[in-house]
Each structure stands twice: as structure tokens, then as C-alpha cells.
Amino acid sequence: MFSFWLNLAELAGDFYHGCVMSRFFIGIPFLNLVSAAGILSLLLTALFSFQSVLSAQLFPGQDAVPETQTTGGIFLWQDVLFFQEWHIQHSILTGEYRLLDPAAVCRAAGSREFCEKVLAKRCEQLAIPPMSGKILVLLHGFASGPILLENMALWFRKQGEYSVVINAAYPSLFLTVGEQVEKFDLLMRPILELDKVEKIDFVGHSMGAIVLRCWLGKWTREDGTSPADDPKIGRLVQLCPPNQGSSIAMTHNMGPIGLLFAPLDDLSMNGKQMKEKFGIPKCDFGVIAGVEEGEDFYGEESDAVLPVSTTHLDGEKDWMKIKGSHSAIPNRIETFENVRAFLNDGKFL
């Protein structure tokens, strides 16, 4: 059954990026990229989240142990706590929390307190130790979810160089970049404070790369501290990042769609505006751009969503191109190998 959802998500991705370069969709304001992707996203959200949402909310105030397979959090779920690869998520739609195991099976749902109690019991039963050593954090992009980066997560887990690979979820459609950064910091700060954690590396795709850029760049906490100054921060790889803004987001942010999808305002800024608001990562970072063969809509090479030139960012330690579309790049072995090389040595192959 789970393979069905994986296939459906893959088809959704193909449809999403097919809309990007379709002159028909781009030419009609309400049948453009963002509206088509947004409508499809909401439909898939309902399908993906209905069962787990219902199990926790059928009787308000009661907690549940649904034991249901999920996709790991699509559009409406925010990871709020990780313990190894077990994690607790919060739904921005219903307000409920749920506990997912490393296979994305929901092991508890309801209040956060209940989920934390179940997690503590599971950790005791399975003798799961606190996180330590090197950790890798993956962050997906706009109108996406951790399922898009799961192949990369599995590949890095197989390599065994990281003690934990965190494939984080956040509600990418409905929060501004600044709001996403604040919530991401709430997720990461307890991990950074663990004594046995030595180093944390990061990979962000598309808007996820911008969230990480901001968190590791200009953003500071209320107490004036910056996560980028933490000695445990390692390197960052940005995959297909709109570092100079997105012309597609700019086009559709002017209408009603811009009111519906909060991040579009941030992604509509030009390179100078983004630099002023988000800054530049203080850690070593590299950029991988995608090149989809035969796509010349922008008058230059592109990944069918972003022109290659818009991925550059001042201060990049290394930069490279890989053949593939915007959604295909995170699932290429060539991408995995180059990400690994940069995180280890500070340069691509």
C-alpha cells in the first residue's frame, strides 16, 4: 500500500514540474504553476493525512495509538522533536501531535505530552541511546515533503558516515521563510546542545536551501545568539536554490495565490533583497544546480524551474551543474556522491 503513495507522490512531482514549463498553464493566471501545484498539493494532503488525523481527533481530548503508515509529513506537518530517527510532529491544521518511528509509522497521536511519554517508553524498550557523533540534516523545498529526499537519506544511512540522518518536515506552503527558520531553530537547538553531538552537516533543496541559508546566515535568536556561530555547525550543500529569487514566484505572488501561499513573498525578492534579508551562510557552503536538457524557456540553461544563473550566491565554496530537473536532482546518485564529497572535503568531485 505504501508503494502506491510513493508512486502517487512521484506522479504529483512529475505533474508539478510539467506545469512549470507549460506555456498553457503559465499563460492563464488561475491555471498556472503555483495554483496547479497548490491544488494538487492540498488534494494529496487530504489523502495522506486523513487517516492519522481522524484517529487522533475522532474523540477530542483523547490520545490514540493508530499504528498507521504515513509519508513522513506532507505540507501540514512540522517536526518539533527528534530522538535518533524517531520524531514528533505537529499538525498546523488540527493542532494534534503524532509520533513517527524511523519507518514513518505513526506510533502515537494526540497531545505532545502523550507522544513524548510513548517515545520515552519506546526508547527504554528498544534501548535507543541519545544522539551523538556526526549528524546530517536534510530539508525539503516548497510544496514538497521529506519523501522527496528519502532516497538521499537512505543512501547516506547506508554509507554509515553519520550516526543519524534527519529528514525533516515542515509546512512549506503556509509559513514565511522567517517563520520556518524560527521553527527549524526550535527543532535544532536541543540537538546542538547535546554533549556527544560533534558535528552537524546540512543539505537543503530549493526553498529548504533558503531556510538553511537564513538560519546559518543573518538570522539571530532573541538572545542575540546565532546558530551559525555554534562550533558544531559543519557544511551546507544547497540543491537547486533560488538564491537570486524566483521569477515564477514573483509572477504569481502578485495575485490571490500570493495571499494563499506565504513563502512566495520571500521567494519573489531579487538577489539584493534576499541578501539583505537572509544574508549569506557563515559556514562553508556549496551549490548544485540542475540542467534539464531541451529546456530554454528562460533563454539560458535551467532545471525547468530556475535558471542556472539564479542559483549562485556570493561566498559559495564550490558550484557545479548536474543534468536533471528541479525535482530529479535530489534523487540522482551523482548528486549523492557530490554532496558527500563536499560535506567531507569542502569541494565537489
Image (cartoon, helix red, strand yellow):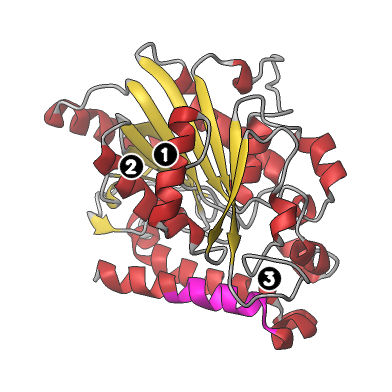
The amino acid sitting under disc 1 is Arg
Secondary structure mainly formed by the magenta segment: helix
Q: Which mark is drawn over residue 340?
A: 1
**How far across and down, in percent of the image, does residue 126 sit?**
14, 31
Q: Earlier in the sequence, mark 1 or mark 2?
A: 2
The amino acid sitting under disc 2 is Phe
| Residue visible at 66% across and 24% down in the picture | 282
Q: Earlier in the sequence, mark 3 or mark 1?
A: 3
Looking at the image, is 341 positioned above or below residue 77?
above
Q: Determine contact: label 3, label 1, CB under 8 Å.
A: no
Between 184 and 134, the one nearer to me in the picture: 134
| Residue visible at 67% across and 78% down in the picture | 21
Q: For mark 1, give the secondary structure.
A: helix
Q: Which mark is drawn over residue 156?
A: 2
Is 18 covered by the magenta stretch? yes
Q: For mark 3, give the secondary structure.
A: helix
Between 104 and 132, the one nearer to me in the picture: 132
Q: Earlier in the sequence, mark 3 or mark 2?
A: 3
Q: Which one is closest to the eye, mark 3 or mark 1?
A: 1
Compute the Cα span from label 3 to label 2. Answer: 32 Å
Looking at the image, is 133 positioned above or below residue 263?
above
Compute the Cα span from label 3 to label 1. Answer: 32 Å
Q: What stretch is highlighted in magenta?
A: 11-22
Is 261 covered by the magenta stretch? no
**Disc 3 target residue:** 34
Q: Quadrant of residue 119?
A: top left
Q: Determine contact: label 1, label 2, CB under 8 Å.
A: yes
Q: Does the image show residue 180? A: no
Q: Residue furthest front?
A: 349
The amino acid sitting under disc 3 is Val
Q: Which one is closest to the eye, mark 1 or mark 2?
A: 1
**How far across and down, in percent of the image, does residue 219 sit?**
71, 28
